[in-house]
Amino acid sequence: MEQTHQEKSVPVWDASVCARARSAEDFLGAALLVDKPGGWTSYDVIRRLKRYFPRATKIGHTGTLDPLATGLLILLFGRATKSQGRFLRLPKVYDGTMRLGEVTPSMDSATEVTLRKSIGSLTFAQIESACSVHTGGIQQIPPMYSAVKVGGERLYKKARRGESVERSPNEVTIHSFKVLRVEGAEVHFRVRCSKGTYIRVLAHDVGQHLHVGAHLTQLRRTAIGSYQVERACSVEQLVAVLENI
């Protein structure tokens, strides 16, 4: 099959190449750009596809997206899973929206608002300044509502029981954090960052810096390295291809 990009020896397929696949075996050894829909976990996408491949086929991805987020996943098929590390190291770009003046336990809209504050007369310049503070190399503490394991158990399971445990901070790099526009309490932004960055933690920390709180309401991953979501295929398109080969 023709390929559109190369990540060393791994062909990276976009929607146009995927549409020309003639058998499930064509995917083996390739990476595929997929646009994850909201409400799906990253593994939900993999699970949906596994039925079309032999049971022993390995399918992986190169960076988890939260269920509420949409956007670019790079799926790896068969021997391409051995190249996961090279893709994981690529920077990511996200477009998101945070709501100032409201705090949730999960730092996004997956849980109910537990604290509300007036945002007063915050200016665009103040919000922009708060975002710029959170650029460069920064320390992030993983949220309780995350898949990180502590003591052999996922943190989100502890959080659902109302527990909170100490978490070690991780260093991440925020290459850029741009405010696109502000509409009342809604701040629309774009972030370019390293692997391992929690955008909802970033939104939460900006809210703390402004003394009003904040949580993430929308998130879309638009790029991984040079790979753009505009060239990705939807899950529906991918399933349609696999059902007809």
Image (cartoon, helix red, strand yellow):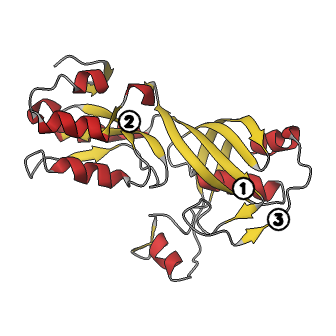
Going from N to C along the chain, the mark reached first, 2 or 3, is: 2
Q: Residue 106: x and y, percent? A: 58, 65
> What residue sits right under mark 1 in the picture?
205
Residue 142 falls left or right of residue 13: right
Question: Mark number for residue 102?
Answer: none
Q: Name the quadrant containing residue 61.
A: top left
Which amino acid type is marked by label 3? Answer: Lys
> What residue sits right under mark 3 in the picture?
117
Q: Residue 14: x and y, percent? A: 31, 25
Going from N to C along the chain, the mark reached first, 3 or 1, is: 3
Question: Mark number for residue 87?
Answer: 2
For the question of whether residue 232 can be seen, the reply is yes
Q: Name the quadrant containing residue 44.
A: bottom left
Give the structural element (helix, strand or loop) at label 1. helix
Q: Nearer the viewer, residue 82 or 185?
A: 185
Give the structural element (helix, strand or loop) at label 2. helix
Going from N to C along the chain, the mark reached first, 2 or 1, is: 2
Q: Residues within 10 Å of mark 3 (few under 14, many from 20)?
A: few
- Residue at position x 22%, y 31% in the image: 30
Residue 122 falls left or right of residue 78: right
Q: In front: mark 3 or mark 1?
A: 3
